[in-house]
Amino acid sequence: DKKGSRKCSIVNAPHDNGHVVGATRSGVTGYKCTLCALGPGEKATIEKVKGRFVLPADLPHPLVFVAGGIGIAPFMSMLRDLEHRDRLEDVTLLYFNRNPQSAAYLTELDDLAHAHPGFRLVLSLTRHEPWKGVPHPLSRPLLTGLLGDLEAGVLPFKGKVVADMISQLRYLRQQLTT
């Protein structure tokens, strides 16, 4: 690929040893074709992890995650970690996608929601008709209706569309972690 390096989000949880799993948007690009063409034993250069988008050491409750599209990747790591530590309680994920086919990890998220009553998956599909789920766009009345008073919680979010929507919600700014 001519551009050189690319970024991806790590999906595996801290307790997953021996391998690293990354996620990118789907699509055909030179980078993805080159990466997919790598065979067993071939080498690729991977830089150290940059940024710090992790769970707080002292978990607040409620814990609310807001993700859009492939922005779900770091939350998968966090949710897997919470499940591993038996701490998947009072956690809500608002997950925005165009349609079920573009919702990465949807089956795993559904399984988590069914296995853990303290985990609530709230899915919004913006281009899927007929859709009787959460309406789009994200707004203060929508969040208040879904989550009640968020004064005590932490609201991490990931994804450009979600960031754009949330940036308009001034009342949440002090609680945002990006």
Image (cartoon, rainbow, N blue to C red):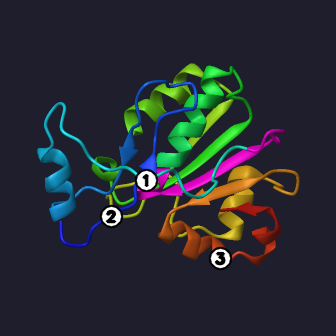
Q: Are marks 2 and 1 in contact (CB under 8 Å)?
A: yes
Sequence-earlier tag: 1 or 3: 1
| Residue name at image x 41 percent, y 36 percent | 20
Residue 55 is marked as none
In three-dimensional space, the C-alpha distance between marks 1 and 3, rounded to whole angstroms, equals 30 Å
Taking the image as shown, residue 144 lies to the left or right of residue 120, namely right
Residue 117 position, x and y percent, is: 65, 25
Of 174 and 148, nearer the camera is 174
Q: Secondary structure at mark 1?
A: loop
- The crowd level at tag 2 (other Cα within 10 Å; few <14, some 14-19, many 20+) is few
Residue 49 position, x and y percent, is: 52, 51
**Residue 69 magenta-highlighted:** yes
Question: Which dot, 2 or 3, sits closer to the camera?
Answer: 2
Residue 29 shows in this picture? no
| Residue name at image x 79 percent, y 53 percent | 148
Disc 1 target residue: 47
Residue 167 is marked as 3
Q: Amino acid at mark 2?
A: Ser
In three-dimensional space, the C-alpha distance between marks 2 and 3, rounded to whole angstroms, equals 29 Å
Q: Quadrant of the N terminus?
A: bottom left
Disc 2 target residue: 5
In three-dimensional space, the C-alpha distance between marks 2 and 1, rounded to whole angstroms, equals 9 Å
| Residue name at image x 32 percent, y 58 percent | 128
